[in-house]
Image (cartoon, helix red, strand yellow):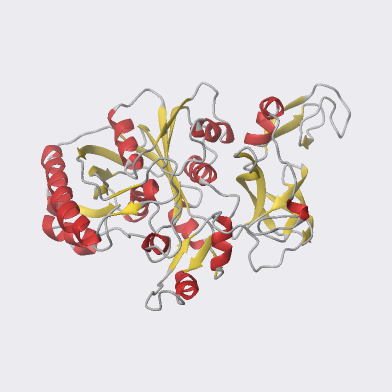
Amino acid sequence: MSNTSTVGIKAFGAFIPRLRLDRAAIAKAHSWAFPSIRGKGEKAICSWDEDAITLGVEAARDCLGNHQDKIGKVTFCSTTAPFADLQNSGIIAAAMNLNQRTGCLDAGGSTRAGLNSLINDLVNTSEQDQLVIASDRRRAQPASPAEMRYGSGAAAMLVGQGDLIASFLGGEHLATPFMDHYRMSGQPYDYYGEERWIRDEGVVKLVPATIEALLERSGTETAAVAYFGLSGAPKGSDKIVAKKLGINPANLLPDFQENVGDTGTAHPLLQLSAAFERARPGDIIVVAAFGAGCDVAVFRKENGSRKPERGLAGTLKDRIPETSYLKMLSFDGELNIDWGPRAEVDTKASFPQQYRAADQILSFTGGKCDSCGAVQFPSTTNCVECGTPDTQKPFQLANDNAEIATYSADWLQYCPAPPLYVGLVQFTSGARVLMEIVDVGEQELDVGMPLRMVFRVKAKDNLRNYRRYFWKATPTND
């Protein structure tokens, strides 16, 4: 191994939605028309207030934790970004409370966008660290094979120099008009070609040759590959490619099909996260993403000790079992439920108000009094405790520990995921905020139950096709 690269991954993070739908529930719902359909394992599904942006924020928080990194650029990669002409990465940067001079970039157009952007930032390094976030909330037509296969999730990688978790040994790209799948602009669902043709004519012929070219260029022996992951290809393709290359099948990274599903742009970065959690210093890691060609990257695990807040293992473990197929359809917008008159409200957002209160709304920043130390949300001219004017300094509540002070479950108020849980949240810093509590599951809420803050969709304006974001609280099992 001659490569002495000093560029690589400094930190990583992952996020999988807590709701996990039993695939048997999908099969049962379609059994009247397709009696032979079978469902195995579970898939990660989003609640009504989760999208690619909110998933991406959670992955970035897991990656950065409480570190004060100087980030020069944020790249957000997704094929399901909620906004077509509004910078999604800018919203994420604001939610992360990053410097306003941070460069922001959206990337998409292919499920390879995540790994492609990561390689690009590793090749084109700068003095400041760069954050790559890949996130997808994948949507599939009911009863299609993709409905069983797709899942949702996000991953984040901090690229830079210095204390590295993994050094970057090289990347390779292949672009070819091999149409394995596509989705026309404005259309809701992907269309796939015949699976055997994709595997035999596309994956098996294109991916191994690209990997071999990269390994030869980076001076890496195939036998040295300790972990190998392939995404975007038909199930079982990773085994075929590994066998063709001479990689031990025992070295395959998980494909997450049993417990998450295919997460699109996030998938290769989630596989990379799995490798970082398993590998030892010196291990060689190869990940490849397929789709009208492929991208391949090779890394070497280093001694970097920085760990994510919960990591992939933690977010996989933090699950809420779900068996309602109709609930998934409703959350995905596939089921038009009559919610009654209480849902007939106009939720138009005020852009001036959103701009003026952006720190409060997007980064959940309140105020801390210089005079008495009281923390409050929102920040006001006079302290709520001592009344002293103009003493409020910015104080972010997003990462502050909290617990339930009071709560109620409201079945009458409109909520896309009833009941609507609202409670007074007591923060460790002393602040008390009335907040919505989400992802409660089957457990009973109780006073004193620990909470964590999550970035979610606050409301959807279906008249103008717009959505607002804010922070909510969720019970934590950490």
Q: Position of residue 410 (x, y in %)?
A: 78, 60
Q: Is residue 384 left or right of residue 348?
A: right
What residue is rendered at 33% in x and 59% in y?
255
Instruction: Name the outermost residue toward the front.
Output: 33
Q: Quadrant of residue 77?
A: top left
Frontmost residue, 447 versus 197: 197
**Image quarter hosting the N terminus:** top left
Q: In the displayed structure, would residue 219 be above or below residue 474?
A: above
What residue is rendered at 23% in x and 64% in y?
250
Q: Is residue 174 left or right of residue 443?
A: left
**Image quarter hosting the C terminus:** bottom right
Q: Position of residue 176 (x, y in %)?
A: 19, 40
Instruction: Name the outermost residue toward the right.
Output: 387
How many marks overall? 0
Frontmost residue, 253 versus 305: 253
Q: In the displayed structure, would residue 246 be above or below residue 176?
A: below
Q: Position of residue 447 (x, y in %)?
A: 77, 60
Q: Quadrant of residue 163?
A: top left
Q: Is residue 300 left or right of residue 96?
A: left
- Do we see residue 13 in this rendering? no
What residue is rendered at 74% in x and 31% in y?
367
- Do we see residue 81 in this rendering? yes
What residue is rendered at 26% in x and 55% in y?
193
Frontmost residue, 414 versus 278: 414
Q: Is residue 1 left or right of residue 427?
A: left
